[in-house]
């Protein structure tokens, strides 16, 4: 009997600056889901990568005096370095400059064009380079983009190719109706529904090469390159080998009858991921994704963290100072899965000492000391019974903080049991009962370690191996001064 398959992809970050904590959050959460589904014995395909075309990147390369390809090569490597820093388990790292992706984007274009959804016309728009998107007056504040207020709005006037987005209002609304959890959380689902209900405008999908040469060539027109959003979104399926490897594509992306793909996105990507991309898939007669999970922003004080504002936290520095699993722990438990959340190093250190050093680290030391001193041999590893519904239900609703709260509830319960049943006293007065109790405590610790796997994989392995060997591990999460 074939195993269930699970496909998950992050959005692809622009490579116009090094990785920041916001993308570290997105990719860590995707990794949590991928690891969780592997625990369930499913075949998982976890995709991430880098978005390497567009005006923003072209200008950044010019500013540094580099050829665009050399520039994106350097920055793509920095994003791929997150694999080791955050202990990520992705199966594929796609770059939109990869030759097979370029070919896939061109094939996707040809299909949409053949189906009558691409036309050429002259237009004049207000354009935010930061978003790489057209902006209406309602999306501006004091004449500037709300998301990128530092950048001046530009006026673009030229003849471009357009995608007939206006053709897809009814089909998108039907998709949203048929899939009640298409976008999570519900507040963002309501937001995109209202956007589509208000009417859709065709959007530009090309740029004149003489003005902006850095992009995928438009098939059959040497004067144009693809608009970055058209090109980049196709990466989710080119990562699976589409259009050449249709079997793999159908196995992991799914079919129209059984869609299978989950996309993780930030709330400023809502329109592109849950409306524009879905309409493009419909035009190409391909299955829509199953679900889009939308996150809030990480803030610093009252400001959104932004590469442009220079107030970002470097994930590599945090890992260097506190360790990979400490960073993964904080992102999973203390950053809200859907709402904007504040991240400061002071809050991080407080959580580290309270819940990692004094909580988990102390518990592991206490239980393993009891086992090492009083048991002659390791306990038999507990059977891999099903995980508790409170735990699985929270993860499957993307409520990672609640899943972590459940684990920490188990940590507190085990601490309380040690305090109340006093195994260190019982084992002296009644060795048989004392050893039986210690074996139970070790089994419970093993289960805590098993549930930690999607969130803190190295710590999970350390705990499970310690229980299996009945040896005290090296100190985990030493208290910060």
Image (cartoon, grey):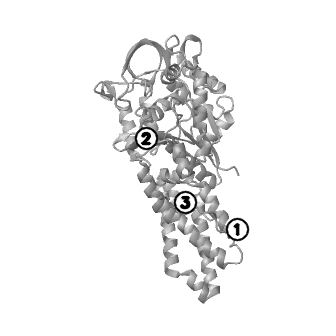
Q: Position of residue 138 (x, y in %)?
A: 30, 28
Cβ atoms at labels 2 and 3 below 8 Å apart: no
Q: Nearer the viewer, mark 2 or mark 3?
A: 3
Is 303 situated left or right of 371 in this image? left
Residue 476 is situated, as x and y percent measured from the top left of the image, at 58, 61
Q: Is residue 151 above or below residue 124?
A: below
- Quick one: label 2 or label 3, which is nearer the N terminus? 2
Q: Are marks 1 and 3 in contact (CB under 8 Å)?
A: no
Q: CA distance from mark 1 to mark 3?
A: 20 Å
Residue at mark 1? 469
Q: Which mark is residue 477?
A: 3
Circle 2 or circle 1, nearest the eye: 1
Label 3: which secondary element: loop
Point out the frontmost of discs 1 and 3: 3
Q: Is residue 154 above or below residue 195?
A: above
Foreground of the two, 302 or 246: 302
- Residues packed near mark 3 inside 10 Å, few (<14), some (14 to 19) or many (20 plus): many
Q: Is residue 474 left or right of residue 212?
A: right
């Amino acid at each position: 009997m074939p195993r269930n398959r699970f496909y998950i992809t992050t959005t692809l970050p622009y490579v116009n600056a090094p990785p920041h904590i916001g993308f570290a959050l997105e990719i860590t959460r995707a990794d949590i889901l991928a690891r969780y589904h592997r625990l369930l014995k499913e075949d998982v395909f976890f995709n991430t990568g880098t978005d390497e075309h567009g005006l923003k990147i072209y200008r950044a390369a010019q500013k540094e005096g580099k050829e665009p390809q050399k520039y994106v090569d350097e920055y793509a490597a920095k994003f791929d370095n997150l694999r080791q820093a955050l202990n990520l388990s992705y199966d594929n790292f796609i770059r939109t400059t990869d030759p097979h992706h370029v070919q896939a984007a061109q094939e996707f274009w040809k299909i949409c064009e053949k189906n009558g959804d691409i036309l050429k016309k002259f237009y004049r728009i207000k354009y935010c380079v930061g978003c790489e998107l057209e902006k209406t007056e309602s999306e501006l504040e004091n004449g500037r983009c709300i998301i990128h207020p530092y950048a001046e709005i530009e006026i673009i006037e030229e003849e471009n190719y357009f995608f007939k987005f206006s053709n897809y209002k009814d089909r998108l609304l039907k998709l949203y109706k048929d899939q009640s959890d298409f976008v999570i959380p519900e507040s963002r689902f309501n937001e995109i529904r209202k956007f589509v209900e208000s009417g859709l405008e065709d959007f530009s999908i090309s740029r004149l090469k003489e003005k902006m040469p850095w992009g995928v060539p438009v098939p059959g027109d040497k004067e144009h390159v693809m608009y970055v959003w058209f090109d980049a979104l196709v990466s989710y399926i080119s990562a699976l080998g589409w259009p050449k490897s249709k079997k793999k594509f159908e196995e992991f992306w799914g079919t129209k009858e059984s869609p299978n793909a989950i996309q993780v996105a930030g709330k400023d990507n809502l329109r592109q991921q849950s409306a524009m991309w879905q309409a493009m898939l419909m035009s190409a007669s391909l299955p829509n994704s199953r679900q889009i999970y939308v996150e809030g922003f990480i803030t610093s004080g009252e400001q959104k963290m932004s590469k442009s504002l220079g107030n970002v936290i470097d994930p590599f520095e945090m890992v260097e100072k506190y360790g990979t699993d400490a960073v993964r722990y904080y992102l999973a438990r203390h950053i809200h899965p859907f709402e904007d959340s504040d991240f400061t190093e002071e809050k991080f250190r407080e959580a580290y000492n309270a819940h990692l050093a004094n909580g988990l680290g102390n518990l592991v030391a206490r239980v393993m000391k009891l086992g090492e001193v009083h048991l002659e041999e390791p306990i038999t590893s507990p059977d891999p019974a099903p995980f508790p519904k409170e735990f699985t239900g929270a993860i499957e609703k993307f409520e990672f903080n609640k899943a972590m709260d459940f684990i920490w509830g188990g940590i507190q319960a085990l601490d309380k049991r040690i305090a109340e049943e006093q195994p260190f006293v019982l084992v002296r007065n009644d060795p048989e009962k004392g050893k039986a109790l210690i074996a139970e405590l070790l089994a419970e610790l093993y289960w805590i370690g098993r549930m930690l796997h999607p969130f803190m994989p190295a710590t999970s392995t350390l705990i499970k191996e310690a229980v299996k060997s009945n040896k005290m591990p090296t100190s985990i999460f030493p208290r910060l001064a």
